[in-house]
Image (cartoon, rainbow, N blue to C red):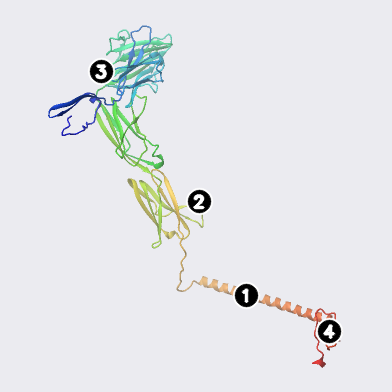
């Protein structure tokens, strides 16, 4: 790379792992070297798939060790399944980012095993393919097909339980692989070898290949003394492939946006070298991968989601692939009602993802409480289905007021996230209506009958009132006369010639005719 005309920076193209190394930076002016310096460039590198092999095979009467080797930058950390600690697993750090670890095989004499190399760029794992020959039925964790690239390691083991049993025997293509003929020695680093071992009552037979080649393709079968057998097909290929499955769209509610992950299924060989998600605002995030697996089948993005297009970028086996998913984050719709008095229609506006269905419902408050779903009926011809595909589409709908005064109306919408309803009560004031023309005969008859009935009731009431009034007056007059007769007594004149009535309740003035 060369920078000219006083440029103070140089921008490299996208770097790969092979760009790591030692570089010389030289500055010149008028063909005279101003200064020169060495730059060591380390490109971050995922750990390589660990090489899993047997170690210490030449030590008699001792179970072999498992050795796990990986390279990466920063230097990877080797871990073993079952959380074996540093006292059980010895770690060795080599040059150029190489790391290896060893552990005794007796730690896993009756179970499968896996070792993983991890650094800041990710994790890669290799496993012991373990087969229990107590039965011929494959267990759920036993693998029947293994695909490897040239140079990778392969470690198989079959086992039986019983002190008096012989070690099981491996064969390939009908040819028996004898432990003596294919014995494991430190000198046979690249060859296939067989190692028999026993621990407690478990009899084991290992098949180890440090670096597989095309000639190692085939089906390997292990058979016990009681004729139980299990097979595994090994395919060695340098041809890489990459395939991914990702939904085209995803619609979620706003409440789920912070807790929902995007997820894709990937198939690749030999390793998934690069995986990242690109958000709608153009930021890139490393994929979240499964841990403690030999093949990553699921890659995720678990950051809070927003509406827009997300892209998944993948690279494996010399191939690149990009997948896109459209995310729609949906909030609860807001219904805006507007009653038009001019044409008597109730209008609604809202925004919703589509496809969606919506309709109008009505409930008469004179017949129902409108509190239960059974109280509502659908307005005829009001149901609509929008089959478009969109994240936020404006929806408009209206209904006329022919339902009449005192009715409750309800608008209901259903989309891929949920269903919502909101009611609206129309109150229409009564209007005066004039009638012109001949009235119906039954109404006229009812009016006449009502008038006659009212008149008769009035006459009866007046007659009763007059009767009671006369009767009361008659009684009052008789009592007055009787009282006056009973109270007449001798009257004597006084000096003024006036006569005073004695023993009367009230004074009476009686004029003497001679004084008139």
Residue 5 spot, x, y in % from top left: 15, 34
The C terminus lies in which quarter of the figure?
A: bottom right
- Residue named by callout 2: 371
| Residue 303 visible at all | yes
Residue drawn at x 19%, y 34% as measured from the top left: 7
- Residue named by callout 3: 213
Q: Residues within 10 Å of mark 1 (few under 14, many from 20)?
A: few
Q: Answer whether labels 2 and 1 touch (C-beta < 8 Å).
A: no
Please tell me in which quadrant of the rendered image residue 6 appears: top left
Q: Answer whether labels 2 and 4 touch (C-beta < 8 Å).
A: no
As measured in the structure, the alpha-carbon distance from the residue carrying label 1 to the one carrying label 3 is 124 Å
As measured in the structure, the alpha-carbon distance from the residue carrying label 4 to the one carrying label 3 is 163 Å
Question: Which comes sooner in the sequence, label 4 or label 3?
Answer: 3
Question: Which comes sooner in the sequence, label 2 or label 1?
Answer: 2
Q: Considering only vertical position in the picture, is 464 above or below 43?
A: below
- Residue named by callout 1: 458
- Residue named by callout 4: 500
Please tell me in which quadrant of the rendered image residue 200 appears: top left
Instruction: Tell which of 395 and 186 is nearer to you.
Output: 186
Residue 484 spot, x, y in % from top left: 81, 81
């Amino acid at each position: 790379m060369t920078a000219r005309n006083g440029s103070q920076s140089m921008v490299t193209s996208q770097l790969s792992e092979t760009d790591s190394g030692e570089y010389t930076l030289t500055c010149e002016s008028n063909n005279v070297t101003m200064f020169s310096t060495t730059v060591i460039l380390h490109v971050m590198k995922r750990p390589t798939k660990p090489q899993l092999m047997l170690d210490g095979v030449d030590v008699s009467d001792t179970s072999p060790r498992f050795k796990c080797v990986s390279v990466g930058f920063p230097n990877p950390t080797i871990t073993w399944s079952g959380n074996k600690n540093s006292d059980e697993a010895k770690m060795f750090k080599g040059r150029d980012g190489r790391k290896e670890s060893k552990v005794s095989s007796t730690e896993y004499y009756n179970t499968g095993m896996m070792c993983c190399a991890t650094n800041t760029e990710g994790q890669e794992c290799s496993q012991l393919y373990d087969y229990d020959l107590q039965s011929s039925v494959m267990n759920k964790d036993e693998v029947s097909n293994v695909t490897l690239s040239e140079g990778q390691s392969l470690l198989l083991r079959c086992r039986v339980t019983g002190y008096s049993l012989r070690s099981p025997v491996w064969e390939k293509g009908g040819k028996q692989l004898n432990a003596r003929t294919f014995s494991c020695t430190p000198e046979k680093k690249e060859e296939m070898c067989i190692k028999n071992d026993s621990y407690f009552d478990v009899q084991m037979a290992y098949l180890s290949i440090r670096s597989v080649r095309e000639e190692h393709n085939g089906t390997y079968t292990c058979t016990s003394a009681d004729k139980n057998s299990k097979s595994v097909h090994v395919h060695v290929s340098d041809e890489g492939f990459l395939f991914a499955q990702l939904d085209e769209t995803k619609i979620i509610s706003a409440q789920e946006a912070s807790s929902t992950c995007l997820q894709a299924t990937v198939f690749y060989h030999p390793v998934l070298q690069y995986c990242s998600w690109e958000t709608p605002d153009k930021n890139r995030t490393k994929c979240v991968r499964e841990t403690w697996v030999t093949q990553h089948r699921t890659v995720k993005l678990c950051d809070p989601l927003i509406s827009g297009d997300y892209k998944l970028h993948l690279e494996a086996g010399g191939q690149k692939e990009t997948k896109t998913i459209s995310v729609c984050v949906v909030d609860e719709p807001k219904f805006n009602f507007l009653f038009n008095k001019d044409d008597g229609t109730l209008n609604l506006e809202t925004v919703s993802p589509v496809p969606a269905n919506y309709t109008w419902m009505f409930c008469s408050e004179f017949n129902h409480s409108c509190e239960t779903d059974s109280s509502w009926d659908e307005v005829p011809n009001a149901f609509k289905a929008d089959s478009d595909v969109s994240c936020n589409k404006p929806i408009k709908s209206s209904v006329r007021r022919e339902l009449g005064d005192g009715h409750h109306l309800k608008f209901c919408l259903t989309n891929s996230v949920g269903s919502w309803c909101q009611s609206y009560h129309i109150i229409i004031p009564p209007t005066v209506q004039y009638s012109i023309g001949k009235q119906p005969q039954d109404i006229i008859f009812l009016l006449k009958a009502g008038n006659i009935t009212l008149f008769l009731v009035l006459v009866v009431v007046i007659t009763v009132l007059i009767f009671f009034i006369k009767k009361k007056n008659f009684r009052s007059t008789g009592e007055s006369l009787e009282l006056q007769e009973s109270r007449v007594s001798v009257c004597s004149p006084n000096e003024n010639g006036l006569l005073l009535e004695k023993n009367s309740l009230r004074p009476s003035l009686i004029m003497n005719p001679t004084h008139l």
